[in-house]
Every structure is written in structure tokens, then in C-alpha cells.
Amino acid sequence: MISDKLIKVGMADLNIASNGEVLKTTGLGSCVGLTLYDPRKHLAGMAHVMLPSSSIARENPINLAKYSDTAIPRLIERLLEQGASMSSLQAKMAGGSQMFNLPGQNDTLRIGPRNVESCLMLLEEYKIPLLAQDTGGNYGRTIEISSDSGILSIRSVQFGTKEL
């Protein structure tokens, strides 16, 4: 996807796009790129979630975009402020890899799968349908979502490009 209206979303960051703008984030390993889209308003939102829960936050104030339990509500809030309808929002997501698999690994090191589980739980809580996902594995991804179409493009070195 090539656009002159590209908005980069960094790690532990979130943003929204409209009017043909494209949101892009790179370096998704264990992080999850969660996107929300309102097809009626052509509004897209993206959060680059690093960790599943703000309960482990050590910074004060916390970065709301860093944790799924704070990023998703903030992303919804920003989309609604721009005119999105809660009942129209649709989700897609990618990432959540288990980048390193070590013997005897405990649950706290399963960051990727825990990020995915946390995002799924919050989407269910907000009753936002998940239309598609490309999660898991042990590889990195770069994703882009178009505010015109809601198409999520996913690139990886191992598997090329696919669209959801």
C-alpha cells in the first residue's frame, strides 16, 4: 500500500486516520497491532500494544497506548470523538508472536499470546466484532490500514504481503 497520506504509529502509540490516510506500524513481534474501522465514516484507528495489562505499569503517569486494557478504550474514545459510531466499529489485528521459545518458560514470558488474549477479551467486552486476525507464529510483521477501505495489509519477510 503506497500513500502520500501515511501516518506512522510508533511502538506504544496509537492514532486515527480519515480522508484516505493510511496508518502504518512496523516492528510487530510480540506486540499487537490492533485496528478499528468504521466503514460508514471511513475512519480508521490503530494501536501498537506492547503489553496486556496496565496493572504491571511502573511509570507514572502511564502511557495509555502501551497496554491493551488502556489502549483499546482510548482508541475507541478518539474514534468516537471524530464521529465514528460504536455499533459500526470492526476490528482486525496482527502480531502477538512468541519471538523466543525457551525451555521452562513461564507464563509471564508469553507476552505475544497474552497480548492477543487481552485484546480479544476487550473486543468482546466492547462487543466489537473481530473480522480477521494474523497473530501468533515467531516472526515480525509490518501492518498498514487504509481509512478508505479498511483493508489491513500485513507484510513479513517470511510470508510476503497479505491483505485482510
Image (cartoon, rainbow, N blue to C red):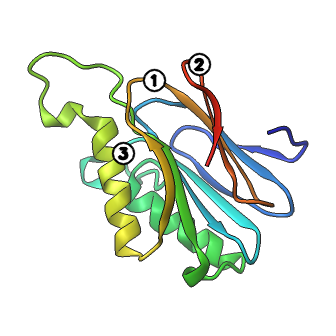
What label sits on residue 139 in the rendered view?
Answer: 1
The answer to which of 40 and 14 lies nearer the viewer is: 40
Q: Are marks 2 and 1 in contact (CB under 8 Å)?
A: yes
Residue 108, quarter of the rendered image: top left
Name the spot of residue 130 as percent of width and height, x first: 47, 63
Residue 20, quarter of the rendered image: bottom right
Name the spot of residue 42 as percent of width and height, x first: 76, 69
Front tag of 1 and 3: 1
What is the distance, in whole Å, between disc 3 and disc 2 at their CAs? 34 Å
Q: Give the left or right position of residue 158, taking residue 42 as reference.
A: left
Q: Considering the image in quadrants, where does the N terminus appear?
A: top right
What label sits on residue 59 in the rendered view?
Answer: 3
Secondary structure under tag 2 reads loop
Name the spot of residue 83 as percent of width and height, x first: 71, 80
Q: Earlier in the sequence, mark 2 or mark 1?
A: 1
Front tag of 3 and 2: 2
Name the residue at 69% across, 42% down.
24
In the rendered image, the residue lying farthest to the left is 104
Which residue is disc 2 drawn over?
Answer: 157
What is the distance, in whole Å, between disc 1 and disc 3 at their CAs? 29 Å
Q: Give the left or right position of residue 126, taking residue 15 as reference.
A: left
Question: Looking at the picture, does residue 57 appear above or below residue 30?
Answer: below
